[in-house]
Amino acid sequence: MGSAERELLSTGLRYALGLRLVVVAMASLVSLLLEPAPRPAFAAVVVVALNGWNAWYAYRRVRGGGSLLTVADVTVMCAVCLTQVWTATPETASGMSWVLVTAEITLVAYPWQIGAKTLAAATVLIMGAYLAGGALATPENWAATVPVQLWMVMEAALSFALYRFVRRGARNADRLVARNEQLRLQAAVASARRDDEREYLAALHDTASATLLMVGAGVATKPERWLSDQAARDLEVIRGREDVPAGQVDLLDMLREVSDRTPLTVRWQAQRAVTVPAVVAIALSRGTREALTNVVRHAAVDTAEVRVRSNGDTVTVEIVDEGCGFDAASVPGNRFGVARSLVERMSRIGGTAEITSEPGHGTTVRLESPMAVRQSGGGDADIIANRFLRGLRWALVAMNLVILYGLDLPKLLSSTDAYTTVVPQYLALGLGTAVSLWAGFATWRGFERIPGRWPLVVLVFAVSVLATQTALPERRLGIAHWSEGDIAWSLALLLLDERAAVFIGVVVAQYTLTFVHVTIGGTSAVTVAGAVNATVVVLAYQMAVGMIATVLRGIAVSAARIARDEEELRTSEAVADQLHDDRKERYALVADTTAPLLAGLASGELDPGDVAVRRRCSLDAAKMRRLFAEGASDPLLHELRGYIELAERNGVSVRFAERGTRPTVPPDARRALTEPAVAMLATAVRVARVTVVGTGESVTVSVVSDSPPEAVPSTEFAGITTSTVLSGSQLWVEVTWMRGERLSPAAPGDS
């Protein structure tokens, strides 16, 4: 059972019990005051006891009362029906008495409490008890009203139909929400995997890659505390064990922790504390670390300034240095540090990253983020509300037609002598039919509101006045005056989607207009108490429908919230499971080389001043470039250019050429294809040349450098061939991948 159906049943039960409490209390107390019963004292005791029982019954039913409570309630209702000889005057006992109102509203409220079979049994018992009580009270006249009294069977059936229609709407809504949830779940997992992949690569770029590059570039020439701390923290990041805060955190604390892990002297311009959501603080602190690392690597200064300010709903962090600067316009947009580590990271939280620099004038990195993280919304409440309304409208269409032809048409046909002309009566019947059919058509076509409803409301009022006018004054408010209350069902159908105040106001206005018309006529077919009882039971039912529509909108919001909470829990579990698997796979890529290097730097076992250690760090940092190349428009060239950039930073002069049409190389094959190039560019001393040639069906990567031959790893991958030539101090390695080939793994050193 979905959240919409659960909320509907829970709220519907409380609402049905409340309706019964109010209607029975109003009808019984008004009758007790306006028309004294044959035994007033006994009637008063029955009325008080009945209302007390109703209150206790409602309390117990809400708390989960079972079948014994239902049996007791039916017994009480039957007993009340049998008291008519003492509690109702002969006039009301044979017509619309408060006892009949009690029996009818009890049956109307039962579908929300008991099942169909129990409802059928309760209806037969209560109806039988009411007829028996009426026979005891007015033995000479009770049979004349049996057809009208039997209407309570139809009322129970109509109420059950309304309940079933609305519940079916709730189930349909739950199915739609569940289907949408599944789509959202798949999208959420896919999006989370993409975001986590990007964040992991950004973190890898900002942490392990940056640290190894600094060591490889000779920034640290001996073991130092800041380097050990940074390497230890980097190791936790790539293992996925980083201590990630939650909730609201102090941004300045996180930024100072980042700055303490660099060899820079950092000046601060900041408030005492800036509290932001953890996800915002993490993005800003990691972006700050990337900016400070770039200062260490490129700015040729040992100081930087960090400025932090919050302005309303926005927090801004600026990292400023007075170093050598660079031409920001010349930096390719696909450079990982700019495009993904900074720009994409900030965009994921709704923020921005901007880099301003000029050669000789320093660099300013500006990170800006909203103080609150964007939350995704959903249309589940609208889906549920529309399905509720659709089910309720179908129920009213059916109810209106059944009332018109099952109750009102027999009244009209048996009372033709009660009208000055019968034409307006048939006109009212036809209008009610037309309204029902038009509403059914609009519902079938999916209209949220019935087209032309307000002109139809005016027409219903006009026909109601005409029908009342043509009924003889002494027959008004009686059986012949069928349109007095039942015409309001058409109004209820037209205004079902309006606000409760509008719905109630229009329906009450119709009753008021009819009563004023009857009062002007000076007479009616029933007593005041009979008129009150008849109005209460019908009007309360109509008000109940209107209020149900209002309550359903509230239920829709509540059910949508519950459904979203449950969905978020399921989604978070699914995302967590998937991300755990992804992170294990990613860690496996760096576990054999990067992790031991960081561990050695963190413990002090590896000396960053050792040439071999620096070479290992450069090589491993270069290999990470293949991970950063994922997602680029041309991953192969992006990866190679990253390696070339690293070699040039180490003082190697590199020439690069690319020609021909290249097929798309699968990721695994691309890694095997570039493996020798990574090693040669990382270990080259002075010069290197890289050439990429495509033939449409194959790709060849050729590297010539002054690298030591032992630095080049063997390549073993199906479809890859390798050629190696050593001439003096120059090493030439050529690696070729052929599309569609299923070759055996290449032997090391094939030539």
Image: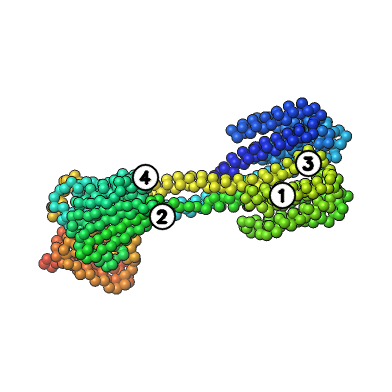
Q: Which residue appears at 14% of the width and 61% of the height?
A: 708
> Mark 4 to mark 2: distance in Å?
24 Å
Q: Secondary structure at mark 2?
A: helix
Q: Which mark is residue 531?
A: 3
Q: Position of residue 90 (x, y in %)?
A: 84, 34
Q: Which residue appears at 73% of the width and 50% of the height?
A: 510
**What residue does disc 4 label?**
248
Q: Residues within 10 Å of mark 4 (few under 14, many from 20)?
A: some
**What residue does disc 2 label?**
191
Q: Which residue appears at 24% of the width and 71% of the height?
A: 657
> Mark 3 to mark 2: distance in Å?
64 Å
Look at label 4 and name its amino acid: Gln
> Mark 1 to mark 2: distance in Å?
55 Å
Marks 4 and 3 close (CB-CB < 8 Å): no
Q: Which quadrant holds the C terminus?
A: bottom left
* Foreground tag (4 vs 2): 4
Q: Tell me if residue 59 comes above or below residue 434 in the rendering.
A: above
Q: Residues within 10 Å of mark 2 (few under 14, many from 20)?
A: some
Which of disc 3 and disc 4 is earlier in sequence?
A: 4
Look at label 2 and name its amino acid: Ser
Q: Residues within 10 Å of mark 3 (few under 14, many from 20)?
A: some
